[in-house]
Image (cartoon, grey):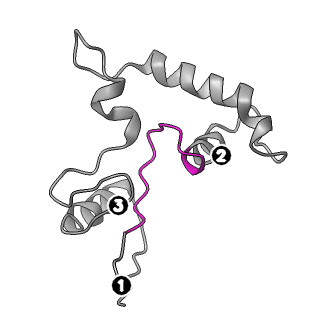
Amino acid sequence: MMTTTYKLETIEHAIEIGKGLSGSRFRGHSKSCCELTPRIFRKEYEDDLLRTFRPKVEFELIEEFKRYAPAFSDKLPDSDNHIDWLFLMQHHGAPTRLLDWTEIVSL
């Protein structure tokens, strides 16, 4: 199995790398033909009338996760540490704006 390591310098560099990986399959995406899209930006979280992302829904999901988080872990981020909360949500399968680039490798 060949592993490629990337050193990210900027967000633009991350996007460039991601675009170059379109032939692979990633967690959360069963087909390699599709664009990589964070779960919170997928159709089930869009406004039905406007067909756009709803920030209020994201905020409500984060707040709900924070209320139930003590059942998942006794080590929780500080309430104002937003990125660590998003990491924890992503780890537990909650919809976030984070994108898991873990490649699925079939042996």
Per the image, the residue denoted by label 3 is: 14
Callout 1 crowding tier (Cα within 10 Å): few <14, some 14–19, many ≥20: few
Residue found 22% across the figure and 18% down from its top = 51
The mark found on residue 84 in the picture is 2
The location of residue 97, given as percent across then percent down, is 44, 39
Callout 2 crowding tier (Cα within 10 Å): few <14, some 14–19, many ≥20: some
Between the residue at mark 1 and the residue at mark 2, the CA separation in whole angstroms equals: 33 Å
**With 57 as the anchor, is 1 left or right in this view?**
left
Q: Which residues are magenta?
A: 90-103
The location of residue 35, given as percent across then percent down, is 21, 50
> Of all residues shown, which one is farthest toward the front?
107
Tell me where residue 4 sits by quadrant. bottom left
**With 68 as the anchor, is 32 left or right in this view?**
left
User: Who comes first in sequence, dot 3 or dot 2?
Assistant: 3
* Viewport quadrant of the N terminus: bottom left
* Viewport quadrant of the C terminus: bottom left
Circle 2: residue type: Asp
Per the image, the residue denoted by label 1 is: 107
The location of residue 7, given as percent across then percent down, is 43, 74
Let me know if residue 85 is in the magenta part: no
Circle 1: residue type: Leu
Circle 3: residue type: Ala
Let me know if residue 91 is in the magenta part: yes
Residue found 31% across the figure and 56% down from its top = 12
Between the residue at mark 3 and the residue at mark 1, the CA separation in whole angstroms equals: 27 Å
